[in-house]
Image (cartoon, helix red, strand yellow):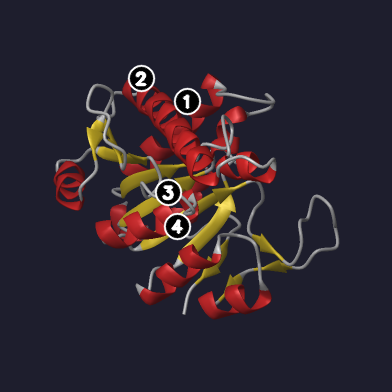
Amino acid sequence: MATDIRFKRVLLKVSGEALMGRQGFGIDVAVADRIAGDIAEARELGVDVSVVIGGGNIFRGVAVASKGGDRVTGDHMGMLATVINALALRTSLAKLGIDAIVLSAISMPEICQSFSQRVAQEHADAGRVVIFAGGTGNPFFTTDSAAALRAAEMGAEALMKGTQVDGIYSEDPKKNPNAERFDRLSHDEVLQRGLAVMDVAAVALARENRIPIVVFSIHEPGGFAQILRGEGRATIVSD
């Protein structure tokens, strides 16, 4: 089965908003459990999966800055939100008997281990799902940038971006149902067109490290494994 898959080692980027489900805030445990199930299905295909998770369901640092607050403090608060989400996903994976570890870019040893590339690689080589929290550990960088950075550090063959829709569109398809959908783009095309699938730093970092970005719907049960098998709907960003 593993010979039929598109990639053998991937990094999955999950937004914090995805964990909300239909709630307006926080974590829907049923959604976290479903995403954990999708990861388990991917692992059954023989794929090594690591995860970067956002924190927008709990707190966004830019929201503080937009109201006149301190952006650095706001971003630190957002980083803490990603740790909460990472712990929730680890709990959901544990329910399925999957060994997972949370590594934070911000040191908090009473709660989770601190990130280093060497430690992350050791856990991945031991067969664990590595969940990266705390973003890059620096303000002014999004968790998209953290995902591209960790994908490069882990030697991932692809960065899988789970979103609210089934690929990249010219505009928000929820606002404009006539928006053009793309099956394939280059990194340069994404940057030149200003397509808002990931921030500029993340796309540029993926381009420099020749990492394809695969954009798909995180809300489609079993969709993650489908994409890994070369099925389903997704947009592939690759040079």
Horizontal relation, residue 210 to residue 197: left or right:
left
- Mark 2 or 3 closer to N-term? 3
- Mark 4 or 3 closer to N-term? 3
Is residue 67 visible from the viewing direction of this image?
Answer: yes
Q: Which residue is mark 4?
A: 145
73 relative to 161, above or below = above
- Mark 1 or 4 closer to N-term? 1
204 relative to 172, above or below = below
Q: Position of residue 215 (x, y in %)?
A: 55, 58
What's the CA distance linking mark 3 and mark 1? 15 Å
Tell me what residue is drawn at x 67 percent, y 76 percent: 193
> Which sits in the foreground, 153 or 92?
153
Tell me what residue is drawn at x 54 percent, y 80 percent: 188
Q: Which residue is mark 1?
A: 33
| The label number, if any, that marks residue 12 in the structure image | 3
Q: Tell us which disc is closer to us: 2 or 3.
A: 3
> Which sits in the foreground, 3 or 207?
207
In the figure, residue 90 lies in which quadrant?
top left
Q: Tell us which disc is closer to us: 1 or 4.
A: 4
SS under mark 3 = strand
In the figure, residue 69 lies in which quadrant?
top right
* Other residues around mark 2 within 10 Å, as few (<14) / some (14–19) / many (≥20): few
210 relative to 40, above or below = below
Q: Which residue is mark 2?
A: 95
SS under mark 2 = helix
Q: Are marks 4 and 2 in contact (CB under 8 Å)?
A: no
Tell me what residue is drawn at x 31 percent, y 62 percent: 152
Tag 2: amino acid: Lys
What's the CA distance linking mark 1 and mark 4? 25 Å
Q: Are marks 2 and 1 in contact (CB under 8 Å)?
A: yes
Q: Tell us which disc is closer to us: 4 or 2.
A: 4
What's the CA distance linking mark 4 and mark 3? 13 Å
